Image (cartoon, helix red, strand yellow):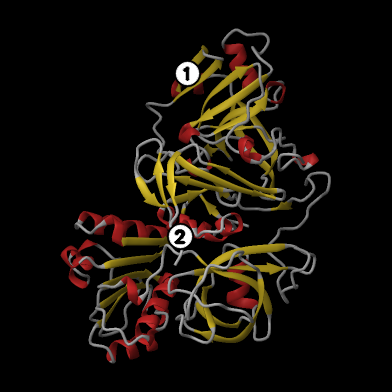
Amino acid sequence: MHLHGDKPVDGNAVAGLFREVFALDLTTASLICAGCGAEAEIGSVRVFGGTMGAVFRCDGCDEVVMRLVRTPDGYWLDMQGARRLFARKVG
Amino acid sequence: MPVTDAPRLQWQTAEVREIVEETPRVRTIILDVPSWHGHKAGQHIDVRLTADDGYQAQRSYSIASAPESDHLMLSVERIEEGEVSPYLAGEARMGDKFELRGPIGGYFVWTIATGGPLFLIAGGSGVAPLMAMLRHRAAQKSTIPATLLFSSRTYDDIIYRAEMERLAAADPHLKIVHTLTRGQPAGWTGPSRRIDSEMLVSEGFAPDAKPHIYICGPTALVESSARALLALGHDRALIKTERFGPTGL
Amino acid sequence: MSDSPVTRGFKGRRGPQGPASRIPPGQHLTTDFPVLSAGPTPPIDLASWSFELQDGDTTLGEWDWDEFNALAQTDVTVDIHCVTTWSKLDTHWQGVTIDTLLEAVGLAEPPGPFTLIHCDGDYTTNVPTEDLVDGKAMIATLYEGEPLVGEHGGPARLLVPHLYFWKSAKWVRSIVFGETDDPGFWEDLGYHIYGDPWREQRYAGD
């Protein structure tokens, strides 16, 4: 695919990939950046990485808060850049 | 329709029921989906196409139809890049089948229960999820004050123009403002520039009214509008953005 | 995946397969130059730019923009292969080879068997030292005769064309030699530690 891969999308665009991994909808979960403490709904966080994987970067400080990669074998999730995540129950 | 989170998101096969040419660049694809459990206005689906040698391409599209609609509608722009949009906007015809999964994403969602006022800002085919919100609002006969500020290239590029005129004419609580950035018909009295701070003030709601704001369109439009709204004093928590952007995730 | 129905009329926009001698397995030709970034494109600021060669914590050499461009320049024409399955033939680059940098700091032999490449935006990638020397890699500053633009890694990117292109790190700022092969940004998250396109080493375990 020929992508403008330097332009971010929103975390909301990763919703399908999230739902392959998690039972809850993570786009409405809130995430706190371990670097600057900024809190944001995951759906609003800028995502880079094009088709290699989802690289979530904090709006406050540009640091990586979360990364998610799908490989043929499974899913790789890194949350070193996040201090806390809260996902609300549905219904 | 009640929306429940299925335990797993399953791919299912949809069939093209009808195609509507909205503008020279955008067409709406109306789909039959065998087991659709409803959606909320603003949600999207993933589309997956499979070539005869097994090669697959995937992309997300916002749902343009209201939750109350019997059929699922996608509005797709003929863009040069990517693989899925050129197919859907060009090659696809009635009876064709492809896979989709959804609805997905609870972040960029508006329902009557979310409340208002509702301030929608769109550029080009970014209007699709916002149209789902207006259609939902109309289907519910809601009187929540709503404004759509819609940036199109030219008059002929205005997606859903006739339906918007109908909706606005029948509804004193709904205002739709078009701005045409690349060409205006004779006698055009509306704005003819990119969406800016002044336009957001004159057409939108004051920060004190605490409008729920949804912005969808090209990255530049989304980011500049969001920045301007924050500078005007709107609450960050009430501003939801959806940048266009192909994603294969 | 194999259960998916075929979509009539959909072929994908894959370029031609190209000559098997030059296109690794699973790759397709492209004539444009797709961009893929793990973060926002940093503004180019040549006045504050520097490049460093390090052995662990020890600085072996550091160059500002003018000093770096005064080093011996090398031209190459190479094929590049992105793990997202595009390949591009006959790309022309100019820059400074890693051999030249080692020579400039007075080293006959590289100081360690592995490297970690550091970039603006906290991007890293790991490359064995032997894949950087003997003319196999350079810090490139010109692409097709023009200064490298920001979205493609300008002002300077690593160029290791015989490995998947994520190894050719954009916005490169230092090479750190070490004794261990520590995974970089993508290698740490499911991508292959080495990334040889001819052995289709895309993901960990390939």
Q: Is residue A13 left or right of residue C116?
A: left
Q: Which of the two marks, 2 or 1, is nearer to us in this view?
A: 2
Q: Chain of mark 2?
A: A
Q: Is residue C84 left or right of residue A8?
A: right
The residue shown at (45%, 60%) is A89
Q: Is residue A34 above or below residue B74?
A: above
Q: Looking at the image, which is closer to me, C19 or A87? A: A87
- Crowdedness near tag 1: few (<14), some (14–19) or many (≥20) residues, C-alpha within 10 Å: some
Q: Is residue B180 left or right of residue C64?
A: left
The residue wearing badge 1 is C63
Q: Quadrant of residue A60?
A: top left
Q: Chain of mark 1?
A: C
Q: Position of residue B177 (x, y in %)?
A: 27, 77
Q: Position of residue B4 (x, y in %)?
A: 51, 71
The residue shown at (41%, 58%) is B219
Which image quadrant: the N terminus of chain A? Answer: bottom right
Q: Is residue C3 above or below residue B220?
A: below
Q: Position of residue B24 (x, y in %)?
A: 49, 80
The residue wearing badge 2 is A89
Q: Disc 1 marks which amino acid?
A: Trp
Q: Disc 2 marks which amino acid?
A: Lys
Q: Looking at the image, which is closer to me, A59 or B80? A: A59
Q: Position of residue C102 (x, y in %)?
A: 61, 14
